[in-house]
Amino acid sequence: MTEVVSNISPPPGAVATVSDAPPIHYMVKIESFSSLGKNAVETYESGVFEAGGYKWKLVLYPNGNKSNNVKDHISLYLAMVDASSLPRGWEVNVIFRLFLLDQNKDSYLVIQAGKERRFHGLKLECGFDQFIKLSTFNDARYGFVLEDTCVLGAEVFVCGERSRGKGEVLSMKKDPTASKYTWKIVDFSKLDEKRQESQIFSTGDHQWKIVLYPKGKGPGMGTHLSLYLALDLATLPAGCRVYAEYTLRLVDQLYDRKFDMYGKAKSWFGASSSENGWSRYGLLSLYQSNNYLFAKDICMIEAEVIVLGIGSPF
């Protein structure tokens, strides 16, 4: 039997009812509930349960979700788990009900949103900032807490599923750090016009390499040295892109000076553009006549790379 509650105000946009039937999908019994606050436990996440072909968990803020400026209430949410295994662009429409046991009457307060809720790659959690007032929750007349123990629960019903098409999440780095790598090329004058690659080096959890065309490439063919920074796609997750700031420098081996002809550059690196740089980095005649840069027929090139952001599909 289910009846509408008249003496408890439901959260905004929700309906409160009373049911004799327990939740069919999941229940959580919390003993020594007051200890959560005493031990500064701001958030409690339940175990994972399955409903409607998906995995879920309950997320409880025993003293309110402070990140949403909630005071004097318990906050309770339903969260989707293991969403990374779902196809790109997924969306699930759900009706869910959250339960709180009245231990005096052996019945449940049921809070349900007034409409379906959508879960997708950018919204994995839905629920109620103001699930119930702390004063009501702790009022012995309602029986929600008995001997410092409470019981919560959830029912989840999937109403529809669809793909929203492709999308992307851009994650910018708050405090990016620079990484440097120096490539030493011996017998530079003996290199032919073929593409030359440095060893792999790492920065920002990604693999990179310097690419050199000693006789030039494209517009620089035969007149200029061509120099590029390349992202190793073998370690890049499918559909991802990397936004990086980089500098490529030639090293003066006698006086330990460094020459970067174009300064800092910023580019996106990904499957459609795995390398960026300059086809006309500098005249070949200038480099070939410069004993400081090519001492003992050795060329040294330094790359400095800072990963600024990651674009990934959802």
Image: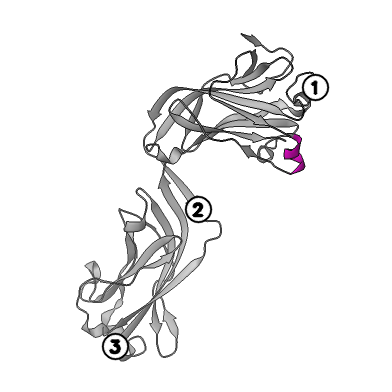
Residue 117 sits above or below residue 289 on the image: above
Residue 5 sits above or below residue 183 on the image: above
| Relative image position of residue 70 (x, y in whole percent) | 70, 34
Residue at 33% x, 71% y is 199
Say left or right for 187 vs 96.
left
| Relative image position of residue 121 (x, y in whole percent) | 46, 38
Label 2, on which residue? Answer: 172
Q: Residues within 10 Å of mark 2 (few under 14, many from 20)?
A: some
Say left or right for 291 vs 172.
left
Identify the amino acid type marked 3.
Asp
* Magenta stretch in the rendered image: 34-39
Q: Earlier in the sequence, mark 3 or mark 2?
A: 2
The N terminus sits in image quarter: top right
- Under tag 1, what secondary structure? loop
Which image quadrant is residue 131 in? top right
Label 1, on which residue? Answer: 140
- Under tag 3, what secondary structure? helix
